[in-house]
Image (cartoon, rainbow, N blue to C red):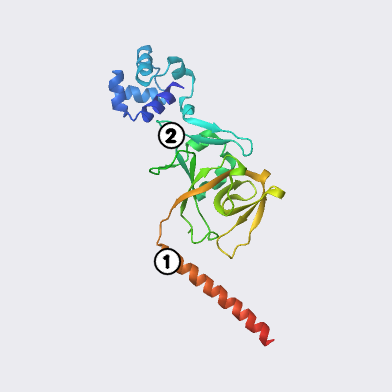
Amino acid sequence: MIGQNIKYLRNKHKYSQQELADKLSVPRSSLSDYERGHTQVSIESLLKLSDIFGVTVDDLLKSNLSHRDLEIIRNKDLRVLAISVDADNNSNIELVETKAEAGYLESFADPEYIRDLPKISFPNIPQGTYRGFEIHGDSMLPMEPGSIVICSYVENLRDIRNDKTYVVISKTEGVVYKRIRKDAGHNKLILMSDNDAYLPYTIGYEEIDELWQYYCHLSFSDNKLTFNYMLEEKIQDMQRKLTEVHKAVVR
């Protein structure tokens, strides 16, 4: 583990290879060989690394130190949640892009997978666990495809608030962003689209792997254009319905 740990600690503490090599009093090429596992690390360098990074020699040699930046959240209602933290022990905001959804559904509880997701930052966000999800499709217009929804983790199903929007993670439906209403009597959620062209549907509590409540979103296009598109779609839909009514009356 020593080479991997040296590289991980160097990057975490934002040292270049030359800076760390200078602290160890070795050539930069030697440090590079240490990190790639091509050269055995001397006892003297091991002791210096221990002092520089505040870790034991035993941990340097035997532990995967990168796993210390990973945390698992467990709760009674929902399943295991893996998160990653930064150098100050604050939770990162991992981004789940559309192209990564299939992998996320298989690996959302795998700390190493979560660690490798892209990270985004958001200023002045309240304490909590957040994740970003890329929206696709037009079921939640005016939330347009390509927008990034920043959501906070829901630890308990009783915390769900009716008619608020959530990202629901399940094996049956995948990653979906919907407006939610509880059907507590049947242990189900009713998932509704803001676009009237999409009908509501239900999902059982037992099918839900993760639930994330909307906090804010990042949009990358002109809202006026999106509104005009929605208005045009509604007008066209009305015209279609009027045409159908007219045909029925003529018959």
**Element class at badge 2:** loop
From this viewpoint, is residue 24 visible?
Answer: yes
For the point 63% across and 59% down, which residue is it? 200
For the point 46% across and 25% down, which residue is it? 65
Of tags 1 and 2, the one toward the viewer is 2
Image quarter of residue 118: top left
Say which amino acid is labelled 2: Asn
- Residue 90's disc is 2
Q: Residue at label 1?
A: 225
Q: In front: 87, or 105?
A: 87
Q: CA distance from mark 1 to mark 2?
A: 37 Å
Q: Position of residue 185 (x, y in %)?
A: 71, 49
Quarter containing the C terminus: bottom right
Residue that sits furthest to the bottom in the current view: 250
Residue that sits furthest to the top in the current view: 43
Q: Is residue 153 above or below residue 89?
A: below
Q: Position of residue 91 (x, y in %)?
A: 45, 36
Q: Position of residue 233 (x, y in %)?
A: 52, 70
Q: Left or right: where does residue 71 sit relative to residue 57? A: right
Say which amino acid is labelled 1: Leu
From this viewpoint, is residue 209 visible?
Answer: no
How many other residues sit within 10 Å of disc 2, few (<14), some (14-19) or many (≥20)? few
Q: Left or right: where does residue 247 sit relative to residue 129? A: right
Image quarter of residue 245: bottom right
Q: Is residue 241 above or below residue 46?
A: below
Circle nearer the N terminus (1, 2): 2
